[in-house]
Image (cartoon, helix red, strand yellow):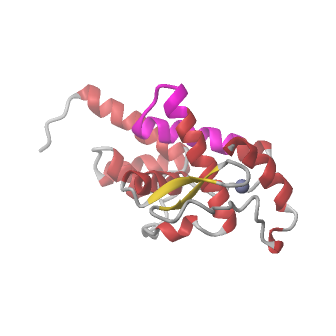
Amino acid sequence: MRMKSLVQDAEETRLAIDMIGLGARMQMLESETGLSRERLLKLYKEIRGESPPKGMLPFSTDWFMPWQQNIHASLYMSLRRFVVEHANLQGLGATLQAFRMYREQVANNGLDQVMSLTRAWTLVRFFEARMLQQTGCTRCGGHFVTHAFDPEHHYVCGLCNVPARAGKGKRAMREAGEALA
Ligand SMILES: [Zn+2]
């Protein structure tokens, strides 16, 4: 039996409720709280009214590289950096706050929400493991998610070099991307 204070238990429950409300999946909940799987499943069902999706998110940095996903990931990381620098938050607190801002920003720009909270959390872990980095675009000066150790000298971002198939989402993405500069 685990010895844990009531205060800590209450704090972790509050955090789990917060994360479930933002759409966290089980792997994130289990990793970020000390609560039992049974307890988390119960909370999840109570809050979302259904069981959590089964299976893990694929754990690969490549998910963040296709055009649209890269812009959203870059937007998220810029917001997170802002939160760390200006809101005096770190770790999970910064990840959650940046995600709230990201949701607001894509909604304001009429964009689809491409990043889920669990994706955002995974992205931050890739940064912490130094598998991904932010690279400055040589044309617009914005900061974008790239693989670590990719050459930086001639990097041009997805907003400056938009694929033709991007179509009508392009302008909205560009507006959202202004936050990256
Ligand atoms: Zn650019």
Residue at 42% from the left image edge and 40% from the top image edge: 92
Residue at 51% from the left image edge and 40% from the top image edge: 96
**Depth check: 153 or 100 in front?**
153
Whether residue 110 is visible:
no
Q: How many marks?
A: 0
116 displayed left or right of 57: right
Q: Picture quarter containing residue 1?
A: top left
Q: Is residue 161 above or below residue 179?
A: below
Q: Is residue 91 magenta?
A: yes
Residue 156, how many percent across, how many down? 68, 61
**Depth check: 106 or 181 in front?**
181
Q: Is residue 68 above or below residue 104?
A: below
Q: Main secondary structure of the magenta part?
A: helix
Residue 24, how many percent across, how many down? 49, 51
**Depth check: 14 or 103 in front?**
103
148 displayed left or right of 111: left
Whether residue 104 is visible:
yes
Residue 49, how many percent across, how many down? 54, 52
Q: Residue furthest front?
A: 153
Query: What's the magenta region?
Result: 83-104
Q: Picture quarter containing residue 70?
A: bottom right
Residue 37, how many percent across, how many down? 31, 54
Q: Quadrant of ligand 1?
A: bottom right
Residue at 78% from the left image edge and 54% from the top image edge: 173
**Location of the C terminus (image quadrant):** top right
